Amino acid sequence: MTTKKPAAKKPAAKKPAAKKPAAKKPAAKKPAAKKPAAKKTAAKKPAAKKTAAKKPAAKKPAARKTAAKKPAAKKPAAKKTAAAATPTKRASTRKSSATAAKADKPAPKKPKPSKFKVKDKVVYPHHGAAIIVKKEKQPVDGKKVDYFVLEVATDQLIVRVPVDRAEELGVRPVISKTAARKVFAVFRDEPQEAGSNWSRWYKVLTEKINSGDIYQVAEVVRDLTYAQQLKGISPALKRMLSKAHLILNSELRFALNLDEDETEKRILRALPKVELPEED
């Protein structure tokens, strides 16, 4: 029985043999450790790719140098093009400025149609009544301008008036019969005398004759007739009175459809008579 005990211990001796597989575990780990090494090699491949990627990056600067040189070579050509384009731009600028200047300039005004026509009876200031006998063109500054030809009734004077400025120059139609009756009423108003300032009075009378207003012309006839009857007037005032009579007669003749003599008789009858005191 004692001899069998050592036989029972044999399995215990086998325990170290069972530990061998445990010792092999580190050996199994070695391939696992190699896997990261393999991964490192795999990781190096992207690094190699990086290097390959850097090669085009290195070429890019070279390409840039070439590209930079090309614009440098083209710069003179670009300047030439710009220089060639400058006259065109200036020309277009001049055209635009010329167009703007034309736009700024006011369009030429069309002449207004005149309210007068041939054979009308009108009054021209300072000359009296007249008849428009015709319309004609006269050269003015290289242009043809339309003119009315007026035949003045007082002394057969011919006056030419631009058609588009006739009203501006004082040409007006002859008064009506009703207005003619009011002219005779002016003679019944109180006459105005020269007073102490004779030169001032003469200037006022001249302005009235040149005004073209028949009522003011009638005042001149009234005042000078009164002054002539009262104490006499100078030769200059006598000429002025004669002129005022002709202007007044010419328009009243057309307005009342009378001849010159009959019109003058009506004027003289309407003028007031000055009764002078009898001398002792």
Image (cartoon, rainbow, N blue to C red):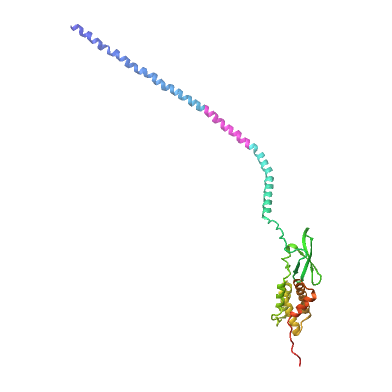
Front-most of residues 200 and 189: 189
Residue 242 visible here: no
Image coords of residue 188 (percent x, y):
70, 80
Residue at point 65%, 37% (across, down): 74
Residue 8 at x, y = what percent? 22, 9
User: Residue 70 in magenta?
Assistant: yes
**Span shown in magenta:** 52-71
Q: Residue furthest bottom?
A: 280
Q: In the displayed structure, would residue 168 be above or below residue 232?
A: above
Q: Principal SS element in the magenta part?
A: helix
Say which quadrant the N terminus sits in. Answer: top left
In the foreground, 17 or 274: 274
Q: Quadrant of the C terminus?
A: bottom right
Please tell me whether residue 128 belongs to the stretch shown in magenta. Answer: no
The number of numbered badges drawn on the structure is 0
Q: Residue at x 51, y 27 (%)?
A: 51
Whether residue 189 sits left or right of residue 19 in the image: it is: right
Specify whether residue 78 is in view.
yes
